[in-house]
Image (spheres, rainbow, N blue to C red):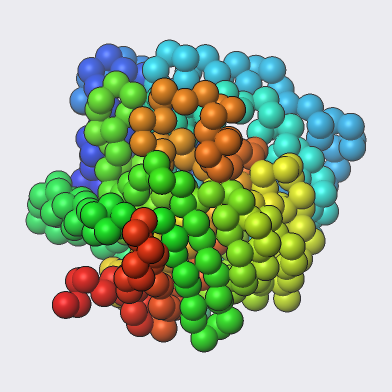
Amino acid sequence: MKQEQIENYAQLIVKQGVNLQKDQLLVILAPIEAANFVNMLAEAAYKEGAGQVAVKWDAAELDKVRFLYAQEDSLDKYPEWDQDFYLKTAAAGAAYISVYAEDPEMFKGVNPERIAKAQRAMGNAIKEYKEKRMSNQNRWSVVSVPTPAWAKKVFPEHDTEAAIEKLWELILKAVRSDLSDPIKAWEEHKQKLKQRIEFMHSNEIIELHYINSLGTNLTIEFHEEHKWVGGSEHAADGVEFIANMPTEEIFTVPKNTGVNGKVVASKPLHYNGSLIEDFYFVFKDGKVAEFDAKIGIETLSKLIDTDEGSSRLGEVALVPYQSPISSMNTLFYNTLFDENASCHLALGKAYPINIKNNEKYSKEELAAMGVNDSLVHADFMFGTSDLSIVGKTKSGKEIKVFENGNFVFENQ
């Protein structure tokens, strides 16, 4: 039965995730430990009429060797053939499936500056590709499968085989692949997220004020043309797709100068192969003015210092505390899952799709509207069971959005 559910999951990703079209190029980005699942994705893609399936393998252990021992000046360089792969497949209209399943502590003990240097080089080299994805010019979907190191981090009390089995159970449940009709379940789920979006739009909320007992006391402003998105999205060609599987969030773009106050993380952040724990930020006029972390402060500092935009917010996401993934009571050490169990924010690049009619604006015009730009996009979680969110409407009225960590209107 589980094998059948895993195969259904692969089909769900191809059909609903990237919504692959006949003769389209599919690119799969995956760790080598996920080879069996990649084969399932390729089979499902070809059965849907894929023109070609190209796979780009991620070998994190080899990356670690490079970060530890490569000559310093080589870290500033990014291979031209890798750059060509991303830019040319994007130009060819490829759909992208990213299998995100890293060892949360793969780069523990590696100098964060060396990792950050290599990440900056990569970010600059493939910036055009990333911009195409984040503006939905290409369809894309981020998914996960268990790998030995990740499964053992989540379930250290189990042996590797049992940990992988347990993590599979949670993943299949989170993506609704354990149900008799996953596609119907996703249609119903997308509708529920649309109702939350309608609540935010119909009330014309232009500011949110967050408070909880961890110490978060944060105000975020939005441009009048901001737009909430969630569940499914539409690419530039009009084809619907699901960017994250699982997904429980609705999200939008903040004014990158309109964030003030303190936000305290409620879960660790896995970034560049390292864990950042027990951290907070203080924002003033949109920029990080103060921060600290009990674990991983060097990595956090490098993240913030990546470029001008990495010290400002690019995303605001609302996720009820009583979301299906939150109810699993599991720390996944994987942003795809942890961010869908908690309200979260993202430092760095914003999604242009969160501005109405964004295609008619130039980059400069979007920047003037407060749409943040950066080489990075790093989500961190701060939602709690006692999170309160009060919205301010365009007319100046205050309206309660969250109480005790959940949407108020759903409990009325």
Q: Is residue 205 above or below residue 52?
A: below
**What residue is shown at x 41% (from left), y 23% (from top)?**
360
- The answer, for residue 154, to whether it is visible in the render is no
Q: Residue 306: give x, y in percent of width and height.
A: 74, 45
Q: Residue furthest bottom?
A: 213
Q: Nearer the viewer, residue 328 or 255?
A: 255
Quick check: 397 above or below 175? below
Q: Quadrant of the N terminus?
A: bottom left
Q: Is residue 300 left or right of residue 9?
A: right
Position in image of residue 180 (x %, y %): 10, 56
**Viewer can see residue 52:** yes
Task: Look at 19% across and 77% down and name the residue there.
Answer: 411
Front residue of this view, candidates 304 and 21: 304
In which quadrant of the rendered view does residue 86 lie? top right
Please indicate whether residue 122 sits to the left or right of residue 219 in the image. Answer: right
- Rendered image quadrant of residue 76: top right
Q: Residue furthest front?
A: 395
Quadrant containing the C terminus is: bottom left
**Residue 122, percent across and down?**
68, 32
At x 65%, y 75%, the residue is 278
Q: Total label count?
A: 0
Q: Residue 88, position in %: x, y? A: 52, 14
- Please tell me which residue is depicted at 39% across the width and 72% down the height of the picture: 390
